[in-house]
Image (spheres, grey):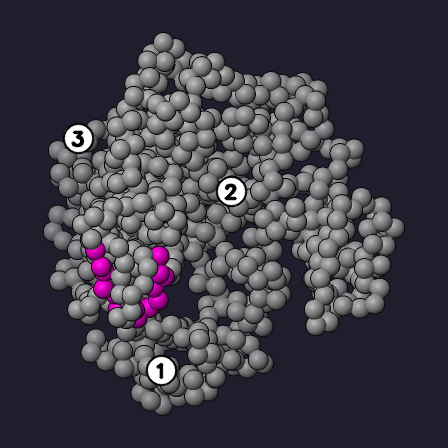
Amino acid sequence: MTTHIAPPEAGPYNKNEEEEKKIILREYRALLRALKERLKRGDKAMLRRAFEMAADAHKDMRRKSGEPYIMHPLAVARIAVEEIGLGVTSAICALLHDTVEDTEISLEDVEREFSKSIAKIIDGLTKISNVVDLKADTTVQAENFRKILLTLADDPRVILIKLADRLHNMRTLESMSRDKQLKISSETTYIYSPLAHRLGFYEIKSEMEDLALKYTQPEIFTEITQGLSETKRERTRYINEFIKPIKEELSGNGFEFEIYGRPKAINSIWNKMRKKHVTFDEVYDLFAIRIIVKSTPEREKEDCWKVYSIVTNFYRPSPERLRDWISVPKGNGYEALHTTVMGPGGRWLEVQIRTERMNEIAEKGLAAHWKYKEGVPTAQENKLDSFLKHLREILNNPDTDTIDFIQDFKLDLFTEEIYIYTPKGDMRVLPKGATALDFAFDIHTELGRHCIGAKVNHRLVALSHQLVSGDQVEVITSSKQNPSEDWLSFLITAKAKSRVKSYLKEDKRKIAEDGKDALKRKLDHLKVNPSQYNLNELMHYFKKPSPLDLYYAIAVGNIDLKELKNFVVHGDKLQPAVKEIKHDIKHAAAEEDHPKHKNSKAPELIIFGERSDKILYKLAQCCQPIPGDDVFGFVTSGEGLKIHRTDCPNAAQLLANYGHRIVKTKWAKNKEISFLAGVRIIGMDDVGVIQKITNVISGELRLNMRSLSIDSKDGIFEGTIMVYVHDREELNKFCNKLGALEGIQKIERLESSETPS
């Protein structure tokens, strides 16, 4: 997939008032052109009113880049219309989406000027605005995520405009500070790209992920974009060679079609490099061939299979890589045939076959075709209805404001799908890995609650039996059966997990009420409210995943409220005393290194790495940063400051959920302290290979080695080396030296999860 990456602005913003007016008017006219075919009588005047109202409300506001603020709502409206496929109502809402939040215009003003439905959508957009509120002290992400999903279940246009808003924010992230770039990018990959994926907006999902990679791991982004640029000519030549015989055959058979090669998303290429432990040069499927056929509704399926037959007449397919999403579309309505074939020069290549209608759904997402367009929704479009129904069922559970809810729901958003049949032959779509019990809950929550087993293809199986596509399942129940805690260990769907947790928590809630009362009395004594912020601080400090668990632990005596003496009160906020390091460390470091910049605009910047006696910090084990890595600090409750790499596996969750705990950090130059780092090495098993490696470590570079582990099989050896280095530069030098040895095929830095204990 290709992505639209907005180029960085060329230098500082320096337009005069006359130039600005011309640019704003040009953008507004572009919006009108995009809506031209959908404008009915009165629409143009209403759109003009919305534009003038927004322009007047934002007239004294500017974006971080320096441009007039009205450019943002105009851009969001254009994305909503051109890239998502929404209409006039949504364009008006997009123009006004920030007015109620940021200006003196009220919802009543909007309703009076336009309509109740427009006011309702803008109200929905305002309610979830704190998710992207950069001024907020904290992001209570689980609760915000739930609010987003509630608005999606109520009126999908709210979240679609929000996706357009977030996409434009990502495209213009260049002018934001580094910590804001990290926070917004992490929220995007954590929440918005999974939603875009589930709603079928593959282009938007890919672009969001690519832009997030650009700001979280700029070196990798640059490496891949440069690699794609350098190989473009060779790719074009190969694609032309591949499609030439197919083109001739399709034309000869009377097909009207488009055929072209498209580079895959940058983030997709990076994921492949990580999973397969290969370099960019070793990723062969950098692009896919797409064939789009013009076809009538009744001939779509037949035509796609005919095209498949023509392609496989020229190139041998891989049978296990055939994906038939025409006979059984994905849960979000995506339809296509995907196959992987052996192309010229012995290279595997993915081919995607679609009709024009299928391509439109794939490009713009199913939601854009849904109830706001004329005509009756198709069977595929009703899939969105079933998704929203499924969403409402989950949200009816009162415990959906917890972090684990996000994790469960994200699994439903991103995982592959399987197709299961009831005894009567009705089909249900479930995530890959779903169990017989997941299926029971998918049919009905009471059926799941009393399920004792199932028959899969007429054979009796346990509740935990994993289903595969094509299974026919009959659920067996008993009125005496009730959910057990063990069920959570094998359930995978968000609906089933949330219902089981709800059943289990019914008794727990009664006990927890006592703990809630005890905590409130204690907080009243401290003159502090039990706000969401304060509950988050207490949950983090006592390591409890939800308020219920916190109250329950207090009620049964597992938490002693005397420990609140470890907190300090700032205004109406509880903060662990360790948070004082944000003040103490900063000044201890800044006074010595940068006396002139003590009161600079980066009050959270902490210089660390050379004064371990003055700065309480630890290097996170999950990513093992070393000097030279791009890092951020995370203030923990009991262990001081923890330093994480920005590409740490946990970075997105920390940055998205605990924005108020993130501290900008910077390595201090110091050659006295050594840091443990690991590399994986692969090569030809040859006599003396270990001696060559140890010569580089001990002889040439004089590094201190902690461990060396080598395993050999069939003439190939693979090993891990743990060494102490001063910084990333020294680690890179070490890797380059090893890579230059004869017979060594690959050197790569170890992720911490792979590090030998």
In the image shown, does 561 or 91 lie closer to the viewer? 561
Q: Which residue is mark 2?
A: 650
* Front disc: 3 or 1: 1
Amino acid bearing label 1 = Val
Quick one: SS at disc 2?
A: loop
Q: Which residue is mark 3?
A: 109
Residue 202 seen in the figure: no
Residue 424 seen in the figure: yes
Residue 347 location in percent, x, y?
A: 55, 77
Residue 454 location in percent, x, y?
A: 27, 61
* Front disc: 1 or 2: 2
Other residues around mark 3 within 10 Å, as few (<14) / some (14–19) / many (≥20): few
Looking at the image, which residue sits at the far front? 480
Residue 739 location in percent, x, y?
A: 75, 60
Other residues around mark 1 within 10 Å, as few (<14) / some (14–19) / many (≥20): many
Question: What segment carries the magenta color?
Answer: 464-477
**Mark earlier in primary sequence (3, 1):** 3
In the image shown, does 361 or 476 lie closer to the viewer? 476
Q: What whole-number distance in Å separates the C-alpha atoms at marks 2 and 3?
A: 44 Å
What residue is at 26 percent from the left and 33 percent from the top?
507
Q: Quadrant of residue 369?
A: bottom left
**Mark earlier in primary sequence (1, 2):** 1
Quick one: SS at disc 3?
A: helix
In the image shown, does 457 or 184 lie closer to the viewer? 457
Q: Which residue is mark 1?
A: 307
Amino acid bearing label 3 = Asp
Q: What whole-number distance in Å separates the C-alpha atoms at marks 1 and 2?
A: 44 Å
What residue is at 42 percent from the left and 28 percent from the top?
539
